[in-house]
Image (spheres, grey):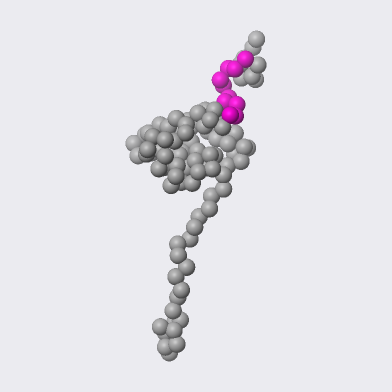
Amino acid sequence: MAGCPGRPAARIWQGAATVVTRPLTLAEIADLPAVTDLVTAGRALGLGRTKAYDLARAGQFPCPLIRAGRTWLVPTAGLLALLGLPVPGTGSPGSPDSGPP
């Protein structure tokens, strides 16, 4: 109690700390490996961790997912396609990855 000799002042509960995660930049998205984790893919879409897992469990995550045991993995090609970004190695005509003419 506050005001009692020999006792510390009462603490006021501030609540749990909130962690704010910023979305990924285009450069960070371009540097993703072939497969990434669900939280990283969610960040690329502007989703928080909880929302990403909720969508995955409901089968509503907006791009393809791979379930490996208890882990959710996201192929980066599907994520890039969803975002309308070029997917390396797709062999589209005129793309640098399409090989010789």
Any part of residue 69 in sight: yes
Residue at position x 58%, y 29% in the image:
84
Give 56 or 34, whichever is nearer the viewer.
56
Q: Is residue 39 left or right of residue 59?
A: right
* Quadrant housing the N terminus: bottom left
Which residue in the rendered view is the most extreme toward the left? 69
> Magenta span covers which residues?
84-93
Residue at position x 40%, y 31% in the image:
66
- Residue 4 is inside the magenta segment: no
Residue at position x 49%, y 46% in the image:
48
| Residue 71 image position (x, y, % from top left) | 38, 38
Any part of residue 73 in sight: no
| Residue 43 image position (x, y, % from top left) | 52, 42
Residue at position x 44%, y 79% in the image:
10
Which residue in the rendered view is the most extreme toward the bottom? 5
Q: Is residue 91 above or below residue 34?
A: above
Magenta portion: prevailing SS class: loop
* Quadrant housing the C terminus: top right
| Residue 78 image position (x, y, % from top left) | 50, 28
Occupied quadrant, residue 15? bottom left
Q: Is residue 41 left or right of residue 85?
A: left
Occupied quadrant, residue 89? top right
Q: How many marks?
A: 0
Q: Is residue 7 above or below residue 59?
A: below
